[in-house]
Image (tube, grey):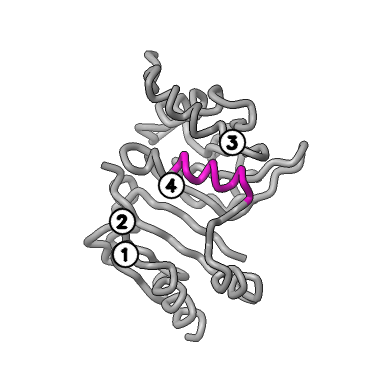
Amino acid sequence: MVRAEGIDAQEFPELAQQFYVSGVPQTVINSGAKMVVGAVPEQNLLAQIKLALAN
Amino acid sequence: MDRLLNEQVVRQIDETFARLKEPVQILFFGSGENCGYCAEIQQLLEELAAVNDKVSLKTFDIQADKEAAEKYNIDKFPAIVIAAKDGEQVSNLGVQFSGVPSGHEFATLINDIVMVSNRDSGLSPDVREFLKNLNQPLLLQVFVTPT
């Protein structure tokens, strides 16, 4: 049910561009439903995941 | 080709891998064509797998092994899947890195291997509870620059 993929932004620049990646790390949830810039605490990420899934 | 991991690095990895509990299956999806770093990544993973018996490596060609690529949802290459292994059974836990695992991302790769081997995400109880009750697919793509 959960897939977690680390993506090398230099190797996949088109994909990085598609999600407007300007700083790293940037976490893209369900192909853009929500995005989180920076290394955030687990709870912050969880909150964004919940918002993404509620859409 | 010269070795990519020097003796000192191998020793450090060996110490870290002493904590491994269960077998880990690394699956590497590369290509003989249009892949500047595939040969190096494959060599790196071979050297990693040689450090500890609990880590094994399978290599696939994205064109020739379409079935495997589809099974593991591989839509780009180079890609590395870190899966759990129990006997002959390989379980995909959804842990993947796409691109070149160099710099900081090499440390992430090592940590992923330890995590999968210990079958423990290290997540807090409430996050585990949330994930257990998840009833729709969740894809987390973390963009990084491996410098």
Residue at (31, 38) in percent of width and height = B103
Q: CA distance from mark 3 to mark 4?
A: 19 Å
Question: Subunit of mark 4?
Answer: B
Q: Are marks 2 and 4 on the same chain?
A: no
Residue that mark 4 sits on: B98
Residue B109: percent from left, percent from top: 45, 42
Task: Tell me which amino acid carries mark 3.
Answer: Ala
Quarter of the figure with the N terminus of chain A = bottom right
Is B65 rendered above or below residue B119?
A: above
Q: Residue at x 50, y 85 (%)?
A: A54
Q: Is residue B110 magenta?
A: yes
Task: From the image, state whether disc 3 or disc 2 is nearer to you.
Answer: 2
Q: Which residues are magenta?
A: B109-119
* Label 2 residue SS: helix
Q: Residue at x 43, y 28 (%)?
A: B12
Tag 2 residue: A14
Q: Chain of mark 3?
A: B
Classify mark 2: residues with Cα within 10 Å, few (<14), some (14-19) or many (20+): few
Q: Secondary structure at mark 3?
A: loop
